[in-house]
Amino acid sequence: MGTKLPGKTRQSAAALLCALAAGTASAGYALNLTEGVTSISREAYRLHMLALWVCVVIAIVVFGAMAWSIYHHRKSRGAVAASFHDNTRVEIVWTILPFLVLVGLAIPATTALIAMHDTSNADLTIKITGQQWSWRYDYLKEDIGFVSNLDEKSAAAAKLGSGVDPRSVEHYLLNVDKPLVVPVGKKVRFLLNASDVIHSWWLPDLGFKKDAIPGFVNEIWARIEKPGIYRGQCTELCGVGHGFMPIVLIAMNEPDYQAWLTAQREAVAKAKAGVDRVWTKEELLAKGEEVYAKTCAACHLPGGEGIPGAFKALKGSTIVKGPVADHIDRVMNGKPGTAMPSFAAQLDDADIAAVITHERNAWGNNMGDLVQPAQIKAARK
């Protein structure tokens, strides 16, 4: 006859069963690696499974022998410990067997490592630069490049007091405004570095993560076999915005990729043409507000208040309300020894001109002056 449980105990047991059931439902994802979509990722998965089953077999043999010995040779059955030692035959066996196991694991692992680092004969090379807190992608030989920031919906929901429920945002903190795009079936070589601190570029479906270190260039490659959207994150604790550096890669069939490439080239040409014209105040303020929200608001807050002890306020700032040349220099070159990075390589001329104009005219600063992209272009020389 079973014992009837009290009400609270039954509720707790039911909750535990529900949790276990949910865990079982997602066990296929949570308890194992993903096979990924490249030959390297599948090789890593096979090595992982090989090592796992070797460990399982060893564990069964060792613990099985221990359990059998403990049961059949226990003291209550009158067992007496054997006194043999220095058995040459046994010592040879338990030396050779582990050696063979290690060799059996080392050969495929070495083969995989050699293949992983063979970046020769690449069809496409992309330079990836980690920067607080976004990724810049430059397609070498294609003359295009862009910065990939956290998408606007995630950024808005992440702000304190925004009133936006993060659960209502699809792919919260895992989406970007401009994803990396690569062609399917082509060998893509990735060159990784960083402009400020150490970051780490990780895409599980590609089968690797690689550190992006200032002053060093690391390289890796991938040949993605099927179209799709693949997501990852920075996996190095790089600062307060570390959690806001997602990675999104879109793999396209060749015709779609070529169409995307053409559109990017046209956008770059349009941006270059826009540098030499005179922008209106409305254009600069609209673009500047957009650039500020993507690039600056994480540190200086949307209202320019800053974070006391960490990031200075731009509202009423002596730099923002001082000479324009000093303001341009601070945005383009940063301030050594502080968290203020250089944006000269991260933003184009129009972006820098617009964001400076926005800062000088927002939050009651009311300087009334404009900064044209041509001024930034001249400052780069």
Image (cartoon, helix red, strand yellow):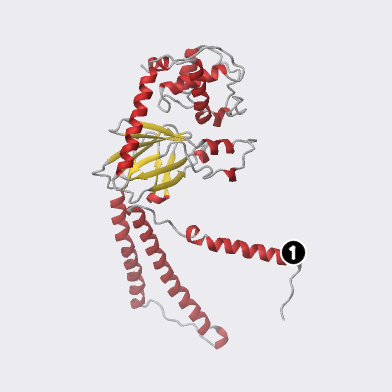
Q: How many marks?
A: 1
The residue nearer to you, when weighing 65 against 322, is 322
Q: Amino acid at mark 1?
A: Lys
Closest to the observer: 333 or 271? 271
User: From the image, which quarter does the C terminus lie in?
Assistant: top left
Mark yes or no: residue 240 visible.
no
Residue 140: image location, x then y, percent: 30, 34
For disc 1, the marked residue is 8
Residue at image location 26% in from the left, 42% down from the top? 123
Q: Which is more toward the observer, 5 or 87?
A: 5
Q: Is residue 39 above or below residue 17?
A: above
Q: Secondary structure at mark 1?
A: helix
Q: Residue 18's x, y, as percent?
A: 62, 63
Task: Specify whether 116 is left or right of 278.
Answer: left
The image position of residue 139, as x and y in percent, is 32, 35
Residue in the image at 47% along x and 13% along y = 325
